[in-house]
Amino acid sequence: MGERLSLVAVFYNEAEKLPGYFANVRGVADEIVAVDCSSSDRTAEICRKNGALVIPSKYRYFEQNVNKALSKVNEGGWVLVLDADERLSPGLKREIRKVLESPQTDVYLIKRINYLFDGFSTRSTINTWLPRLFRKGCVHWEQEMPHEKPVVEGKTARLSSIFFHYAYTSVPAYVQKMDEYLCRMPAEYAKKGKNRILIGERDSKVSMIFGSHGLRRMFLYPPILVLNHLIRRRLIFDGRRGAIFAVCAGIYSFFEEAIYYEVKSKEKNSVMINWKKEYPDK
C-alpha cells in the first residue's frame, strides 16, 4: 500500500495553468490540499472540481499559506509540495510511489530544472535541490521571512528523478513577476505591519562586500551579480537564454534597491506627489 501522501499547493489566479497541473498529478496523491489566495478567476472552482480541499486565504505570501495547508495534513502523513508552474516528470512519479512503500528517511530532496524563456536551463547551477517530499513536521516555512528557504528537521536523502519549473516562460512574464515581487506583495506585507526583508539584507556575504543598502549596493552589485550568474553559476553555457536571465537578475537587484531608496526617502521627507494638485495655484 505505501504511506499516505498529501499534495499541498498555494494558488493565486492560476486558472490557466490548473488543467495541466491536475492532469500531471492525477493518481499521485491520496488527497490535495490547496490554499486559494483570494483569486479573482476560477482557481478555487477548478480545484474543487478536481477533488481538492480548498482553504481560503486573504494573504499572498507563500510561506504563511503553505504552513496553513500543512496544518490540514494528517499527523505522520507524507507531503508533496508542488506549485502551479511546476510539473512532475514521469520518472519522479514512479520514484515517489516506490520510496513511500518503505521510506528510508524523513525528507527527500528533489532536483528542480528551470525553464528560461525558450527552453530548460540544463547546464547551469541555478537548478537546485529542494525538500519537497517529506513527512509532516519535518519541513516548515518561516512565516515572517518572504522567499526564505524552508527549515528542515530530520534526515535527508536525494531522489534521482527531477521535476520541472516553468519559471519564466517569456521576458514579459519575468517583468510581471518582478512587479509582483517588488511592488505588489511588499505592499501587502506592509499592511500587516511587517517590514519586508530584501535580498541584500538576507545575504551576509553581499552585505559584507556591498553593504545592505547604499550606492555600492545599488550600482556595483547588479553587474557583479550578472557576471556571477554567467560564470560562477554557468548560465553562459545556456547561451542566449542564460545571458538574458543573468541580465534580468541584475536589473531586478537594481530596482529592488532603487525602490528601497525611494520608500525611505519619502518616509524621511514626507513628500508625496498629489496629482490632483499637479498645477498649483499661482
Image (spheres, rainbow, N blue to C red):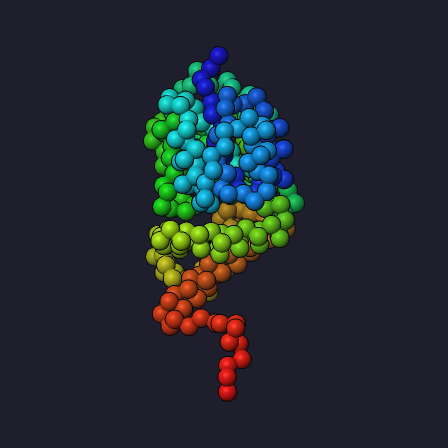
Give the x, y percent position of residue 148: 40, 44
Q: Is residue 135 above or below residue 183?
A: above
- Residue 207 lies left or right of residue 219; in this view the side is left
- Residue 269 lies left or right of residue 110; in this view the side is left
Q: Is residue 214 above or below residue 237?
A: below
Q: Is residue 49 above or below residue 237?
A: above
Is residue 266 visible to us here? yes
Give the x, y percent position of residue 12: 53, 42
Query: For this rendering, which residue is in front, 13 or 20?
Result: 13
Is residue 25 visible to us here? no
Q: Give me the residue at 39% from left, 27% from top.
A: 136
Q: Is residue 14 above or below residue 48?
A: below
Query: For this rendering, which residue is in front, 159 or 237?
Result: 159
Give the x, y percent position of residue 139: 38, 32
Q: Residue furthest top?
A: 1
Query: For this rendering, which residue is in front, 156 or 232?
Result: 156
